[in-house]
Amino acid sequence: MTALIPVDFAATDIDAIKDMEGRLAIFVPPAGTLDATAKRVNRLTRGSIARAVSGDAFEKLEDGAAMVLSYPVNIPAEAVIIVKLARRPTVGEARKAGATLAKQAGTTKVHALCGNLRRAHELAYGMILRAYEYTDQKTAEKTAHEGASFVVNAPDDVKAAFDGLDALAEGVFFTRDLVNMPANVLTTTEFAKQLSDLKDLGLKVEVLEEKDLEKLGMGSLLCVGQGSDSPSKVVVMEWNGGSKGDKPFAFVGKGVVFDTGGISLKPAAGMEDMTMDMGGAGVVAGVMKAIAKRKAKANVVGLVGLVENMPSGNAVRPGDVVTSMKGDTIEVINTDAEGRLVLADVLWYAQERFEPLGMINLATLTGAIVIGLGHENAGVFSNNDALANAFLKAANVEEEGAWRMPMGKAYDDKLKSRIADMQNVGGRPAGSITAAQFLQRFVKPETPWIHLDIAGVASVKEETSFAPKGATGWGVRALNRLIMDNFEGE
């Protein structure tokens, strides 16, 4: 898996600046005043920093953005990165500045001269997140990242504040790697193996095979994968970091490793993007890794349904009726509305086995949510205001876009079937909402629940603040924050 760039925290040494190679980074507030380290760089470079920050180019920079002085005189550093940043930045501003460093530095060593800059640990975290690059399928020789040294006045305090952020970044990277992997690499079997390897972190991992799923009556999930040579699986990950006997919080993820649409075949154009249709399971995997790495004081379970949706002589057909684990029958109107069929059985199983105190499922479920919210926000559907508000607060803190969507009986009525208990689609209008209504039928009334439709945010064509184009890892940070702020003991 993709490794984090190496970072360290060192004590400020004004005299050592003159010998630093690679790239120097200094942080200058909008007013243009220089701290002690920036003044030292300015003197060494014969006033070039003062001239730069007094010009129009610096004034026009957004907070967290940077200008670069290449090959500065009188010092061995190949460049000085001047980042516009308040001395007491917000968390978001500090992380954005860190991301700027990652983009400006490339793989070259960075000496970030922070001095007494507040939230230097968040600066480091932002840089790590943005320095991600997926290269597993490239054969060109890879250049190792030289990393970054954050030069601060109180390194021990900054190290302590940084504790746990590296674990969270590893969870984000795990999600990104899984979502970026091509489908011939990340088969259902390989996905299950990747998750089984998390046992090394203290997670209890169990893989349910097709014969186990048949015994459980998961006809809804199994019908999706029956046209593929890849076996369908459900993987259960348990982290027991809380009090013994306390009910866990549950995450459930859709893991369609490739989605052709089945017999209701998708158009050829863009089908290659359907390697990301396991994004929900990828987020669950990343959250569970982060929770285990930082040894969260909570009981959390993660369950993912792993299938491949392929057309074949054995594939489920439009018009077929299948029976879910709950016992409800489902008329399959469209085999490309397969994610909800997978989640239905895993949601029910999670409740029957664990009786969770709350449950959130994630899925790249509908194109309709992309039409409604674009690539800026995930759709949030819930039966519980308290849980929904807690999640939205966590997402806001982590600056991961999320927007609550409506639900109601009128939408649910669109799922009526003439020959079965329900059908799996409700027509084009309000497509993301009727999909959520379908899932709610497999959520017990007493279970606080959220459905996150992440079709627009899991993988994108343009770079984001903290990721290059491709997989974003959206949701790992927000869900980890939700657990940390609401479900961990002292």
Image (spheres, rainbow, N blue to C red):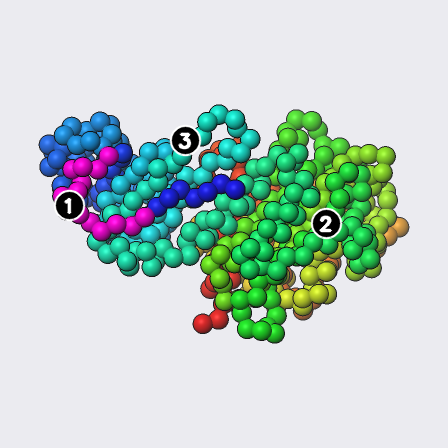
Is residue 164 visible in the rendered image? The answer is yes
Disc 1 residue type?
Ile
Q: Position of residue 46 (x, y in %)?
A: 10, 32
Give the residue drawn at x 78%, y 54%: 213
Q: Is residue 223 above or below residue 259?
A: below
Residue corresponding to mark 3:
143
Asked if the magenta segment contains residue 20, the reply would be yes
Q: Position of residue 456 (x, y in %)?
A: 57, 41
Element at label 2: strand
Element at label 3: loop
Q: Quadrant of residue 158?
A: bottom left
Q: Is residue 400 above or below residue 295?
A: above
Q: Quadrant of the image for the C terminus?
A: bottom left
Q: CA distance from mark 1 to mark 2?
A: 58 Å
Residue 382's disc is: none
Q: CA distance from mark 3 to mark 1?
A: 30 Å
Disc 2 residue type?
Lys
Residue corresponding to mark 2:
233
Give the residue drawn at x 59%, y 37%: 181
Give the mark nearest the N terminus, 3 or 1. 1
Residue corresponding to mark 1:
14
Give the mark nearest the N terminus, 1 or 2. 1
The single residue placed furthest to the front in the displayed view is 200
Q: Position of residue 459 (x, y in %)?
A: 55, 39
Q: Which residues are magenta?
A: 8-21
Indicate left or right for 414 with 16 as reference: right
Q: CA distance from mark 3 to mark 2?
A: 37 Å
Give the mark nearest the N terminus, 3 or 2. 3
Q: Residues within 10 Å of mark 1 (few under 14, many from 20)?
A: some
The single residue placed furthest to the right in the displayed view is 419
Q: Nearer the viewer, residue 338 or 303?
A: 303
